[in-house]
Structures are given as structure tokens and as C-alpha cells.
Amino acid sequence: MNRPLVIALPGNDEMAARIARDLDGDVGELESRKFPDGETYLRFRTDPKGRSVVLVCTLDRPDPKFLPLAFTAVTARQLGAARVGLVAPYLAYMRQDRRFHAGEAVTSTIFATFVSSAFEWLVTADPHLHRHKSLDEIYSIPAKVVHTAPLIADWIAANERVPLVIGPDIESEQWVSEVAARARAPYRVLRKERRGDRDVQITIPDLREFSGRTPVLVDDIVSSGRTMIETARRLREHGMPPPICIAVHVFLSQDAYASLREVAADVVSTNSVPHESNRIDVSVLLADAMVALLGPHR
Amino acid sequence: MNRPLVIALPGNDEMAARIARDLDGDVGELESRKFPDGETYLRFRTDPKGRSVVLVCTLDRPDPKFLPLAFTAVTARQLGAARVGLVAPYLAYMRQDRRFHAGEAVTSTIFATFVSSAFEWLVTADPHLHRHKSLDEIYSIPAKVVHTAPLIADWIAANERVPLVIGPDIESEQWVSEVAARARAPYRVLRKERRGDRDVQITIPDLREFSGRTPVLVDDIVSSGRTMIETARRLREHGMPPPICIAVHVFLSQDAYASLREVAADVVSTNSVPHESNRIDVSVLLADAMVALLGPHR
């Protein structure tokens, strides 16, 4: 049996190394640089011929990443790779999954079509599934989703003695209840009214019965951090201590991260998107999903 | 007959307006913005249904541009556009057209495949054709190239009384001789030895017979500006005055542009890539090429 060849796109070296280790595969080398005119040069320094190739590329800020990633996938096949799959710990373009207004680009399905034509399979962690029940509705290749809720619950149980898990909105209730049950903690969800990309109104439920507990805010994506910062402030008005903030996927800029740390007891994230706050490793889940998807021969 | 609908991707509004005017078409409106997480939102504000759609997007620094451009093309078709073509005044990924070393991505042909699957036709100005004789060798859609040499020659003839046209290397000789003949000027080409992306050795020919003439350096792409700056310095050592520097496609950063202006009498470019130095308008050529390619019904 051929060992799978795990290759990192730029910025994904650590995750690729972890996955290769979990998968008992080899890390392959991809040379990548920019020409002075902004074009990308790519070269396989490890021969993918006959190998099962796993490209690792998390897809936060996806626009500049897509073309180099697609070039790499096509090249792997041209060079004789047996199969080429994608591990995207964070998967992009999961929001615009319908034409809400006339003329809109339904980027979710178009992006899925592009990825499905470049790769033979896909593994990702907790994609932002709204209206779609499963990735199979938009991805035409075998796609496996890993759920980070148990890892987050275990982190909470190991690090906070008397937590109160707080979810961002009613839609998150099922996920939040799963985290809370496994962490053996109570939970509540907020009411959130979105007035624009960057303007959100939050309503705090009655939390008097939980005084003495540490609020643990959980959310799938934290990008500007505004909702969590605002929630932390509102919790303090209700007499609660500074919360622990946990994100599955974190996109915080340096400034936003600093602002959030000012009002939070701690800021914690999975390593789906590389960030200073990464404390929960999802690589084993991703590797297990690959084995489940591809079978023992990968 | 339906008037063609010309739509600018971000940063291409001026070129789109010129092409729409030259083509007797309408400028359509595309709303485009970035979400906080770096994804692109796109919406046709002008209905493309039943129209011949012309997307205008120059492809310098192509990686962040490709995905929004492809989303827009697919969406135009979903919304019922009769046909969707691309005017890319500058066309990217024309250099790596072979696997020079084992394992390299042949980005030129892969990029051509991607563009050919997103669009029904392509018009561009002076692509960097090396080994390929024509775009048809790599693009599977009808592709029309416009040649800017006559415009450059006319600019020289109108702005410099006693020019000496100087080309960057022996491969450029045919193009340089065409520019010089139409400008009614003598020409010479340099000998250039490339030692890396950013390191080039230049040899100046004997120019004694041309004393009193103003050197006019012409090149297809000026990105770091180093070759032109070095050439200007070497020309001065040979007793020549500061040159006029002309680029078809200009990628100069602010700093590089300032450095080049210090040693040049003037810096001039076509508007294929928007830049302060743009002085030669290629929009009419692009519009004419579209009419030639698509016929009177476009």
C-alpha cells in the first residue's frame, strides 16, 4: 500500500504535518513563490506519481488562495497522482446559498462546482450550513464533515469548573446543547437580530439562576469579534463575570483580537484557521474523516 | 439588435466606459463588496438576460481577481445572458508555458483552460507570447489579440522629433522594428541576460552614430522597472540623454515609478493596466477586435 502524500499550500504547514502524522502519510514538498507581477510559481518537489495526494488548504480569505490551489490540484493529476483530495479545515463560501435578491451571485453553489471539478474528495470541519442540510446538496464529490463540538466540550470540561455555555442565536441551539451536555454544563442561547454585515442587536436571557458560573460563549465563526465583545459587555451589565470566548473558526485581526481579550477571561479557537488563539486541535478528526471517506487504501 | 452590455469588474470602470462608448453598448452595473471574512459579494444591478455580456477585467496581480471574475461570468449565464465574453486588456499567466523543471505547474495552459470554461470569447492586448505563436494554442475559445505597436509608434512620432527606438532584447526585434518603421525612426535592440526573476545583465550596442537622438526604450511589460533603470544608467555612460520609457503593460509600484522617473525623460504606458503613467488608450483597438470576433451582432 502506498502511503498518502500530504501537501501544504502556503500557510498550512503545521496542519499538514499533523494530518500526515495522524494518517501515517508522508509530507510532500511544494515550492511556491510570487513573481514580481503577482503571478504564482508552483513546483512539486516531491513526485506525486501514483500517490494518493492530500492537499491541505484552509479557505479563510479565499479569493487569493483559490487559483494557486486549483493549479496545484490540476498539476498533481498531470504528474500522475492516483487521486487528489482537499482538506480544507475551514471551507469558504457557505453563506450565499440562494439568490436572496435579483441578480445576486450564488457563490456557495458556484464555488462548490469549482472545487468539485478540481478535486476528487473533500474533508472539512463544521461548515457554515444554513439552508443546506449537507454538503452533498452542493458538492458533487464525496465530502465529509467533521464536528468539533466534542473537542470544544472536552476543552470546556477540562478548563472550567462551573461553566454556563452560551450560544449566539436560536439556530445554534442544537449544536450548543450538544456541547453543553458533553461538558456537563447548563446552556442558554442569545437572541440576535442582524441589521447588516457589521451591525447586530443582542438580547440576553434571564441568567439569575446561573450566578456564580463562568459564561462560555461559543460560536462557529468569529470574524470582527463585535458580537462577542458586545455580548461580554451586556453580560457584565447582568452581573456576570468576563466570559471565556470559544470559536470554531477564528478570523480576528490583531486589533479585534486585542479588543476581545480586553473584555474576555480567555479567547480560544480550534486550529482550523491558524491564529494565536488556537488551542483545540482538529487534525485527528480530519485524518479520521479521510480514512472513513477513502477506506483503508485512501 | 440588442446593444451589448459592458460590465466592469472592480477597478476597470474607466476602461469599461471607453469600450461601451467605442462599441455603442451600455455600461451595466455590478455591485461588488467584501464580507468581513474576505469573501466576495456580487450582484448584477443591470439585468443581463438575453444580452451579449462583455466583462472587462485586466488581469495584472491575477490571483485575487480570478474567483470574483469567474463567479460573475457564471452568474451572467445563470441570469440568461445570451453570451459572456472577457476583455482582459492585460492577460495573466503567459510565462510558464512549459514544464521547464520536473514538477512545475504549467500555469499558462491551466489558466487558459479555466478562462476557456468560464467565457465564450476573449480579447486582449499584446499577450506575452513566447513559445506559443498564438493564443489558440492554449485557449479553446475564440481569442483575438490586438497589437499596440501602431499606437506606440504614433505616440513616439507625435511626441519626439528625433527618436532612437531601443528594444529590450533580441526576441523583441520584430516588434521593435515595426514600432520604429511606423515612427520613421532608427532602432537598436539590447542584449539581455536573465539570471533570475529580479537579476538581469544588459549589454548596450554601439550607438555613436545616433548621438543627438533621444533614446526611446520600449518593452512589453515593466514591473520592477529595474531593467529600464539600469538601461537608462548605462545609456548615460555611453553619452546618451535620459530616455523616454514606454511600456505596453505597466506594473510599477509607487517607489519603482519614482525611481524610474528619476533617470527617465518621461514614462509612458498604455492603459491596459490602470497607472499614473497611462497615456496611450487601447480601448478602441479592443472594441474593434470584439466586433471582428463577434460580427455585427456581437
Image: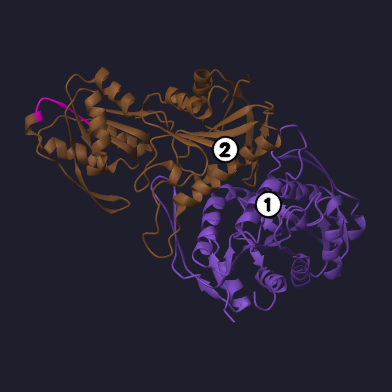
Chain colours: A brown, B purple
Which chain is home to disc 2? Answer: A
Numbered disc 1: secondary structure: helix
Q: Amino acid at mark 1?
A: Ala
Which span is picked out in magenta?
A: A210-216
Whole-percent x, y for residue B23 in the image: 62, 76
Q: Amino acid at mark 2?
A: Glu
Q: What residue is drawn where x is 60% and y is 50%? A: B62
Numbered disc 2: secondary structure: loop
Q: Nearer the viewer, residue A62 or A97?
A: A97
Quadrant of the rendered image containing residue A133: top left
Q: What residue is drawn where x is 28% and y is 35%? A: A175
In the image, farthest residue toward the bottom: B1
Is residue A234 on the magenta stretch? no
Q: Is residue B39 left or right of residue A265?
A: right
**Same-subunit check for callouts 2 and 1:** no
Is residue A211 on the magenta stretch? yes
Q: Residues within 10 Å of mark 1 (few under 14, many from 20)?
A: many
Quadrant of the rendered image containing residue B211: bottom right
Q: Nearer the viewer, residue B146 or A124?
A: A124
Quadrant of the rendered image containing residue B175: bottom right
Q: Nearer the viewer, residue B73 or A242?
A: B73
> Which of labels 2 and 1 is toward the front?
2
Q: Is residue B228 visible?
A: yes
In the rendered image, the vertical position of residue A218 relative to residue B207, given as above or below: above
Name the residue beneath numbered marker 1: B112
Name the residue beneath numbered marker 2: A120
